[in-house]
Amino acid sequence: MALPLLLALLPISLLLGLGIGTSGAGWSDLPGLWNDDADPVVRQILIDVRLPRVLLAALVGAALAAAGVAYQGVLRNPLADPFILGVSGGSALGAVLFGAAAGATSLGVLGRPAAGFGGALVTLFLLFRLARLGGRTGPTTLLLVGVVLNAIASALILFVITAGDPARFQGEFFYLIGRIPPQPLSTLLAIAIWLALGLAVLATQSHRLNLLALGEDAAGQLGVDPERSMWITVLAASLVTAAAVAFTGLVGFVGLIVPHIVRTLLGPDHRILLPCATLAGASFLVLADSAARVVAAPVEIPVGVLTTLIGGPFFLVLFLRHLREEGGAVG
């Protein structure tokens, strides 16, 4: 029942996103958009600007929510999120470094996500190595190391921007806070392909994630190779994160908020949780980006600011609850 509802919610969210803005074009212009007497300026706003933007928001929201489900499942940590773990920061740094080295080339559509994936892999390597220095990888340690790595990646992005040509890298400042800019069809198609590949892999791991929730020993007895499943899941989640972050920057906490709400409503079965959170993430970011356009009108704020304002307190509440539960378990 939940999946059909979420499938219906997505096109509704897209239509809402198309009709919301500060330029004057709205829902009343949609029915006559293809008429011969349609205002060409309105048509350009809706088709060339808003439509690519809402489609990009849907793809990015789906990617980040799916990645959040994957990280939380494989790490058995409900607080895991691409942004909090530093994977988003590493991906954004890789994309910015690619932009600094390659400039405006035709390889950007494929090169930026690939470079972002490379940055995510380096971040994951550092994350697990540093978190294991104390002898074991604890959930809280992973989060703290991830926050530090994300801060370092943000500082390096800022260094690349300020050390380079300010005019050339002015747009890269938005990588530090996240925004949804209109993108050409080729970019949207490339992101959709990367996302489809990553989601296909994650779908094959959904049953294994259910077994890993029982613990590595129990999962091993049921025929699951915990190490292999972990890396397959982490790599696929990093792939979809890189595809999203490469063109939008650090849109934070989507992978925390959406999976947590969907899990609370529908339960922890990853075979249901993964597709439902993916669809919910798409709708969530479309609506969040629509709100970001008008909440401070006529000024338009980046959507990453809004998701952080929502997700920061959300994470803090969950983190404090997690600490209380850990303390109770120890007691």
Image (tube, rainbow, N blue to C red):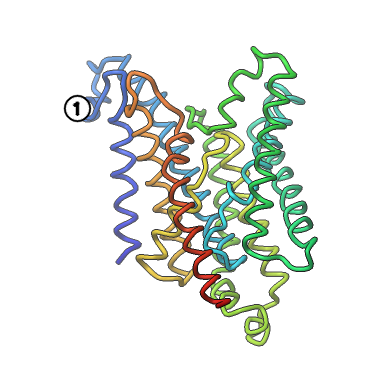
Question: As drawn, is 34 to the left or to the right of 177?
Answer: left
Residue 102: percent from the left, percent from the top? 75, 25
Give residue 297's position: percent from left, percent from top: 32, 22
- For the view shown, which residue lies furthest in the bottom direction? 221
> In the figure, residue 45 lies in which quadrant?
top left
* Quadrant assignment for the C terminus: bottom right
Q: Which residue is mark 1?
A: 28
- Name which residue lies at 51% across and 74% down: 328
Q: Secondary structure at mark 1?
A: helix
User: Going 67% across and 21% down the picture, which residue do you hit?
Assistant: 104
Q: Residues within 10 Å of mark 1 (few under 14, many from 20)?
A: few
Q: Position of residue 228 (x, y in %)?
A: 72, 70
Residue 58 against residue 180 in the figure, above or below: below
Left or right: 100 in relation to 64: right
Please identify the quarter of the rendering in which residue 114 is found: top right
Instruction: Say what amino acid the circle numbered 1 marks.
Output: Ser
* Nearer to the camera, 254 or 271: 254
Q: Position of residue 26 (x, y in %)?
A: 25, 26
Q: Nearer the viewer, residue 196 or 326?
A: 326
**52 to 69, vertically: above or below:** above
If the image is split into quadrants, where does the N terminus sit?
bottom left
Q: At x 55% / y 57%, what residue is drawn?
A: 199
Image: 220 above or below 312: below
